[in-house]
Image: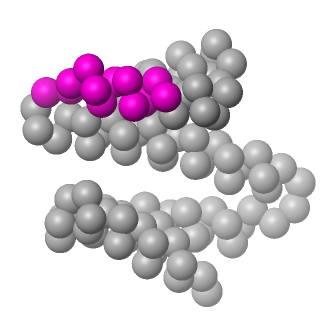
Amino acid sequence: MSWWGKVVGGAFGFMLGGPLGELMGAALGNYFDGGLEKSQGFGAAERVQSVFFTTTFAIMGYIAKIDGKVTPDEIQIAEQVMQQMRLSALQRRVAINLFN
C-alpha cells in the first residue's frame, strides 16, 4: 500500500490551509495513491499526467479564491505555470477553466 501521496498531500495542504488544508491534501494524496496503484500498464503515464494537470490548476484556483478575491498576481502565477508546462491552446483553455 502506498502512503507517500497522503503524507506529501497532507503536509502541502497543512502549509497552505492549516488543519483543513491538511485533511484536503491527505484526501487528494489518497486519491493520487489509488490512481498510481491502478495505473500499471498501457497509458499509465498519461493518466498520471492528467491527474497532475487537473489537480494542479484546480487547487491553484481554489487557493486563489480562498480570500474571496483573485488578484492579478495570482493570475500571473497561473499563467507562468502554463508557460513552463508549454501547454497547447486547447490545454491552456482547459487549465483556465479548471482554475476558474
Left or right: 71, with 87 as reference point:
left
Q: Is residue 82 above or below residue 52?
A: above
Percent of width and height locating residue 45 = 78, 53
Q: Is residue 22 above or below residue 92?
A: below
Q: How is the image coloured?
A: one colour
**Position of residue 76 in the picture relative to residue 2 (left or right):** left
Q: Residue furthest bottom?
A: 1
Name the main secondary structure of what is drawn in magenta: helix
Residue for point 26% across, 20% down: 72
State which quarter of the image contains the N terminus.
bottom right
Indicate whether residue 17 is drawn in magenta. no
Q: Which residues are magenta?
A: 69-80
| Quadrant of the drawing holding the C terminus | top left
How many badges with numbers are in the image? 0
Q: Residue 80 versus residue 49: which sits nearer the camera?
A: 80
With 91 as the anchor, is 75 left or right in this view? left
Q: Is residue 65 visible?
A: yes
| Residue beneath the point at 81% across and 66% down | 40
Residue at the left extreme of this rendering:
68
Name of the residue lying farthest toward the right? 42
Q: Is residue 78 one of those drawn in magenta? A: yes
| Residue occupying the point 49% across, 28% down | 80
Residue placed most toward the observer, 34 or 92: 92
Q: Residue at x 64, y 15 (%)?
A: 90
Q: Position of residue 25 (x, y in %)?
A: 36, 64
Query: For residue 63, what is the image quadrant?
Result: top left
User: Can residue 100 be seen?
Assistant: no
x and y percentages locating residue 94 in the rendered image:
54, 23
Is 35 left or right of 21, judged from the image as shown?
right
Relative to 85, say whether 17 is above or below. below
Q: Position of residue 55 (x, y in %)?
A: 48, 46
